[in-house]
Amino acid sequence: MSYILNIESSTTNCSISLANNGKLISVREFNEKNYSHSTKMHSFIEEVLKNSNISVNKLSAIAVSSGPGSYTGLRIGVSAAKGLCYALQVPLISVPTLKVLARQINIKGKDLIIPVLDARRDEVYSAVYNSKYELVRNIFPEIIDSESFIELAKENKLYFIGNGQEKCERLIRKNSNLIFSNYDTFPSSKEMVLISYEKFKKSKFEDVAYFEPDYLKKFRAG
């Protein structure tokens, strides 16, 4: 039995889930623009454990969304994950935030998934994944303009997901291969379940003392 607690806090969605051997058992999440992570995260953790009738001491690992995303949200999530790992003496697993977001879309063939999270001004955090959720272009912050992703769209349908879509649809030159969905889509710990379990089976753990989120950009107050 491998019980893994998954923590996703990279955006306004504070999301906690518990899984056993890669199967979701319980999830608790709440999305509001004021970032309620610091007040809700620990109570959500208690709730998913209580609802599953699982003691915290039965946890095999803690998984946390590693970014990119909100500096404050990531810091709160990673701090909580590290605290649990130290207290329980269990390993820490990191899961790329954009991969979590990409798993909300199922595609086939040569089509591609473009998860995009809103950043400052006309910028988004983005990546490109194939139908097997394999990374085919690195994750980085980019300024969106009329030519963004156009080369990829010449031979593939591009399925966008995430709250950075509005910028993309507004700024990129129109192309029938650009497929947009609900703008208000956010990473959820539900999509962390399979990723964290696969990493657990392969013992792909982080150094709890030195692990830091992938902020990608320096923190800027205000």
Image: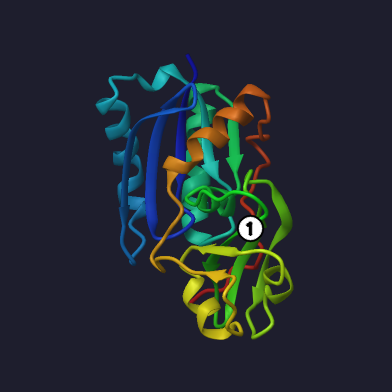
Secondary structure beneath dot 1 equals: strand
Q: Position of residue 79 (x, y in %)?
A: 51, 44
Residue that badge 1 annotates: 112
Residue at 46%, 53% (x, y): give it: 187
Residue at 55%, 50% (x, y): give it: 107
Residue at 48%, 60% (x, y): give it: 72
Q: Position of residue 97 (x, y in %)?
A: 56, 52
Left or right: 166, with 143 as reference point: left
Give above or below for 119 relative to 30.
below
Looking at numbered disc 1 in the image, what kind of residue is underneath it?
A: Leu
Left or right: 103, with 48 as reference point: right
Q: How is this picture coloured?
A: rainbow
Q: Position of residue 144 (x, y in %)?
A: 63, 80
Left or right: 184, with 150 as reference point: left
For the view shown, which residue lies furthest in the top direction? Answer: 1
What is the count of numbered marks?
1
Give above or below for 192 relative to 177.
above
Q: Nearer the viewer, residue 87 or 212?
A: 212
Residue at 32%, 27% (x, y): give it: 49
Mark 1 surroundings within 10 Å by alpha-carbon count, few (fewer than 14), some (14 through 19), many (20 or more): many
Q: Quadrant of residue 204?
A: top right
Q: Nearer the viewer, residue 100 or 130?
A: 130
Q: Quadrant of residue 48?
A: top left
Give above or below for 138 relative to 167.
above
Q: Nearer the viewer, residue 6 or 129?
A: 129
Q: Position of residue 65 (x, y in %)?
A: 53, 46
